[in-house]
Amino acid sequence: MWSVSGLSVVLVLGLVPGPCAGLKAGECEVCVTFLSKFYQTLKDNKVNFNNVDIEREILKSCRDTRGKENRFCYYIGATSDAATKMINEVSKPLSFHVPVEKICEKLKRKDSQICELRYDQQLDLSSVDLKKLKVKDLRKILEDWGESCKGCAEKSDFIRKISELMPKFAPAAATRTDL
């Protein structure tokens, strides 16, 4: 049989919070970055902070995303082809101005894939030799710029296209003379 003091110890230990499941540095990189930018946009545009308006703005923002951010939108159900709908797990806390790190922490518990998303390393085009890159990497550069290389059959075609577009997308790298 439990004694009163033994029961008190059990109750007190039950009230003490366990180890914090907080995010580690760099964890949930895409979630935190996307939601931080999104939250700032809401504040800048003076959007009403209610669930309906926030959900509408998330859906609108997710229409224009590509890459990892589009995958994040898919995971929370903010794309037309998403299988799940967790968008309210984002809109409701945002309506109460909950920090985005806490929102991502909660999303991680619901779907761990959300925090596994990482941005790809960006190439420093001012120091990289395009001739040494793989065609896959050259395609990725063009894709990141929102461009394509129709009719490109050889590596030299991709390099030529990137060199043509550099003044527009990477002006600092365009001043190189060894391209």
Image (tube, helix red, strand yellow):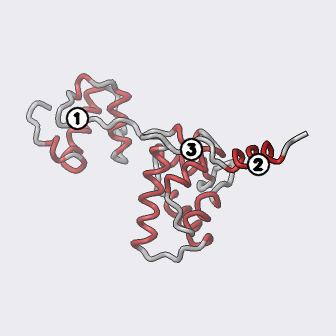
What type is the residue that disc 3 sits on? Cys
How crowded is the residue under tag 3: few (<14 C-alpha within 10 Å), some, or many (20+)?
few
Q: Position of residue 42 (x, y in %)?
A: 46, 69
Q: Dividing the picture into quarters, in which one does residue 88 lie?
A: bottom right
Nearest to N terminus: mark 2 or mark 3: 2
Q: Quick one: quadrant of the C terminus?
A: top left
Q: Looking at the image, is 60 positioned above or below residue 73?
A: below
Instruction: Answer with mark 2 or mark 1, whichever residue precedes in sequence.
Output: 2
Is residue 34 shown left or right of residue 3? left
- Which residue was labeled with disc 2? 8
C-beta proximity under 8 Å, tags 2 and 1 = no
The residue positioned 78% from the left and 46% from the top of the image is 5
Residue 26 appears left or right of 52: left
Q: As rendered, which of 22 and 154 lies closer to the eye? A: 22
Q: Residue furthest right?
A: 1
Secondary element type, mark 1? helix
Rounded to the nearest angstrom, the CA distance separating label 1 from label 3 is: 52 Å
Closer mark to the observer between disc 1 and disc 3? 3
The percent coordinates of residue 15 (x first, y second) are 69, 50
Q: Helix or strand or loop: what does disc 2 sit on? A: helix
Q: Amino acid at mark 2?
A: Ser
Which residue was labeled with disc 3? 20
Camera-side mark, 2 or 1: 2
Number of callouts in the render?
Answer: 3
Identify which amino acid the numbered label 1 is placed on. Arg
